[in-house]
Every structure is written in C-alpha cells, then in structure tokens.
Amino acid sequence: MCVIMTAIAILRQAQDKVSKLTGKLSMFEDKWLLWKLRQGSSAALCRIYEKYKNDLLALAIALSNNKTSAEDVLHDVFVSFAQSAGRLQLRDSLKGYLSTSIANRVRNLGRDKNKPALDVDELDIAGPESDCPDRLAISKEQSQRIGAAMMGLPYEQQEVIILHLQSGLKFKEIAEAQGISINTIQSRYRYGIDKLRSILDSEVQK
Amino acid sequence: MSTAENIEKLVKKFFKTRKSSAATSSQMDKKILSDALTAYEKLKMSTSADLQPSVWRIIMKSSITKLAVAAVLVIAAVISITFLSKSATPAYAIEQTIEAMRSIYSIHAFTTDWDNSKGEAWVQTNPQTGQEEYYYADQNNFLIVGTPQATYYYYKDENLVRIRNEYVPASEIRFSRFFEDLVKWVQQHHGELSFYPEFDQGLQKEIIIVRAFIPTQGDMKEQEFIVRVDSETKLPISIETLKCGPGQGSKSVDGIEYNATIPEGIFEFKIPDGAKVVYEDKNGRYGEVNSN
C-alpha cells in the first residue's frame, strides 16, 4: 500500500514537472508566434487560431451559456485580434490576453441576452461510458448539478471562477484585465466557491 | 460537508469535461480564418506605418495631433513649469528643451522593443519646419527606409520588400517638436506632467526627469513614461515606457545622438537579391515582381 502511495506521489510530481515544462514551451512558442505576426506572417495567425480556438470557444460557451453567441464572440475576438496584430505588445500571456478579450466581449454583449441557459445535453458531455479516464471522474448527473449551481451564482463570481479554474488565468491577470483590485477578484472567487459548496451540499442533503 | 478544495476540484473536472466537448466546426474555422486573414492582410496593406518598428511609437503614436504653429506660445502661457534644483543646476523650464530641439537636423537613436530586440534609427529633419525628410529604422528582422520619393519596408526573414510610391511619415508628430505635442497630448487626455531632478549614476551628473501620466480612458489603458533630459543641453537622452496597454508603446529609446553625421547612403535602399517586391500606392497593391 505504502509503495503504491509513494509511486503515485512520484508520478504526480513528474506530471507536475512535465506540465510546467509544457507550459513554458507553450509560452515560448506564443512569443515567437507574436513576433512572427508582427513581421507579417499569416501562418502565425493561423497557428494561434488553431492553438487556442477550442479553449476560447469553451470559455465563451461557459460565460455566455449560448453556443451561437459563443461562436460569434470567438469570431469577433479573433478578427479584432488580427486587426490589431501588428501593434500588439503583450506583457502577459497570449492565452490570458485572448481569454480576457473573450470575457470582455461576452460581458459587453450582456449576458441576459444569452439566456436561456444552455442545456448541458447540447454540449454532448461524455458520460461514465466514456473511455477517457478524466471523464470517468464526473458523471453526467454531477455535471448537470454543477452547471445548474454555477447558474445560481452572480455573474461576476461565475466569471472569475470560469477564468481561473477553466482557463487557468491567475487572479492578478484577471484583475488587470478588468481594471479592478486583486482583492476584489479573490473575494468574488471565494464567495463564489462558498456559494457553490452551499448549493451542492444542500442538494445532497435533500 | 464538502471542503472548498473539494469543490474546486469538482468544478475543475466539470470544466475539463465541458471543455473537451467544445470544438469548432470546420465551417466555422473556415469563416473565422478567412475573415481574420482578410483583416490582417488589410492591416498589412493599408497601414504600413503601423507595422514599422515600434521604436518611434513611444514618441509618435497615439492620438497626438499635428503641431499647431502657435504651440510654443500656448505652452509658455499654460505650462510654465520651472523648478530650481537643489544642486548648482540652473533653473529648468520646458521652453529650454523646446528651443534646443528646434535646432536638430539629425537624430540617431538606439532602441529596445518589448521582446528585448535592439534597434537603430536615423532621421534627417529640416530644422526650419521640423519635418522629417528621410528616415531609416532597423529593428530586428524589419527595416524601413523613408525618402521623399518612396517608402521601403523590408521583411528580412521573408526576403520581402514592399515599396510605397510616396513618403509615408514616420509618425504623426515631429520628433524635434516632441515636447510641444507631449504637453498638448497630456492636456487633452487630462493627464499629468511632472518634472524633477535626479542624479544619474551612469552619467555622473544631475539630469531632469519628465514624467508623463495618462489615466485609463475607454479602451486606452493608463500610460506612463519618463523622458530623461540632459540638464546642460536640455535635450532628451532616453525615453522609457513604464506602463502602457497592448500596442500602445515600445519599451525604450535607450540613447539618442543629435546632429551626428548621417552615414553616407543610409537612406538609399537597395533591393536585396532574390527578394519578392510588392509595389503599393495609397489604395493598395498594384504590382509584384521577383528581383534577381
């Protein structure tokens, strides 16, 4: 038992290291792509799109709860990015820049327009029958409960939770992009998680 | 009772599951890429100046409008900011810099962009009008040469030359009238302009720091940069961006030489062997050849 635990711990450490290294390589590639973009390379623009399109679409769907609006948002953000490509000078990550652009555009659209909420079935979420180990960890029923609980949060809290847990943005990046203090962002996140816990716990007790 | 950590893990898994099922369709990819590439090509073709090395953007970009003839008088009346330094440095007034810059006929600048690439630029100006007549800017893999007859853009890594059949100004403003426009710009954007003396360790003498700050306005993020001014010549010796939004400024102009002898032939652009040459006018591309 002890040997297995140790092996798991070692594997997790290795996984963390690989993940960090992959992240660094990805950022390095982004810097190179941005540099190429400023030099006028259309291929760089295509590569950036290919690299981030699905993540950005998922983010737009999570924030807008509407797949059609999400696709429009992705289109507008990317065209706008192409229009400003020659002048772009990023201090933070490219992923962070694109993700906050998505969030800003969804917010500008007015999230109320995006309702009714997306039916989780529409996204074809894989159920327990999936052969992917990651997916096995969460059932369709659980997904529906969490999705519904997320909808019960104020939009500001949903947004921070999605940007942090789904897109992996740091609180600092979110705060800078939204022009508000990091303390406010952290508070929104904390309140949001507490409320989610309370909603989900109360459902279990029922 | 779930802990916050458990909830975070659960929500993360939920997002991961949803994320894995969100994918763009090939039709959507085609539409987005087509529109994005069109926008990008349009940007490359129509706004050549925007793609020039951002070395001059610190100075020349943004909404700084063209210099009014009477700007000096306005500035003298509105901003007669002077101070007495604590040392033996004589009193400084911005008018002294304005006056000193009006005698410039050549500028040689050394620059650094956000990717830490180093660059160099030469500008020949007419001291009477302040207009740049020729310029040369070399930043990493991009070179631009502006002459009264044509403006040449050379993308070294692609061996591509774009030739615009007219003089494309290096900027919206004239460097030799930089401070006049700076003052006007700060006023228009309700910003702050401050001056203070500082001892420069490298130069071993006191210099004047001019700090410009523009608060966030609409889509434009707050901007802050400092200009170091030589207390003897009253001329700027370096410029550094401290804060700016994406695309609103380059990192720094590390050194500036004034009225240096311009290297012979530096403004004579020669098309490199084998380069693809694209000819443009203000309406866009009108010809394309491959040089031998």
Image (cartoon, grey):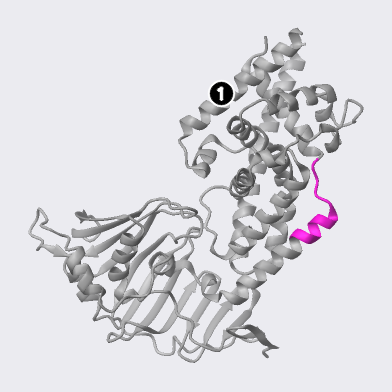
Is residue B277 shown to the viewer in this render?
Answer: no
Helix, strand or loop at mark 1: helix
Tell me residue B192's x, y (percent).
Answer: 29, 54
Is residue A183 shown to the viewer in this render?
Answer: yes
Tell me residue A69's x, y (percent).
Answer: 73, 47
Q: Which residue is drawn at 63% across and 45% down?
A: A99
Classify residue B94 by image quadrant. Answer: bottom left
Q: Say above or below: A161 vs A66.
A: above
Parent chain of label 1: A
Query: Residue under circle 1?
Result: A190
The range drawn in magenta is B22-32
Tell which residue pokes out farthest to the right in this image. Answer: A129
Q: Does the magenta stretch include residue B24?
A: yes
Tell which residue pokes out farthest to the left in this image. Answer: B88
Foreground residue, B185 or A14? B185
Q: Which residue is drawn at 51% across and 26% down?
A: A187
Tell me residue B212's x, y (percent).
Answer: 31, 57
Q: Say above or below: B179 vs B106.
A: above
Around disc 1, counting alpha carbons within 10 Å, would you say few (fewer than 14), some (14 to 19), or many (20 or more)?
A: some
Q: Quadrant of the N terminus of chain A?
A: top right
Foreground residue, B119 or A141? A141
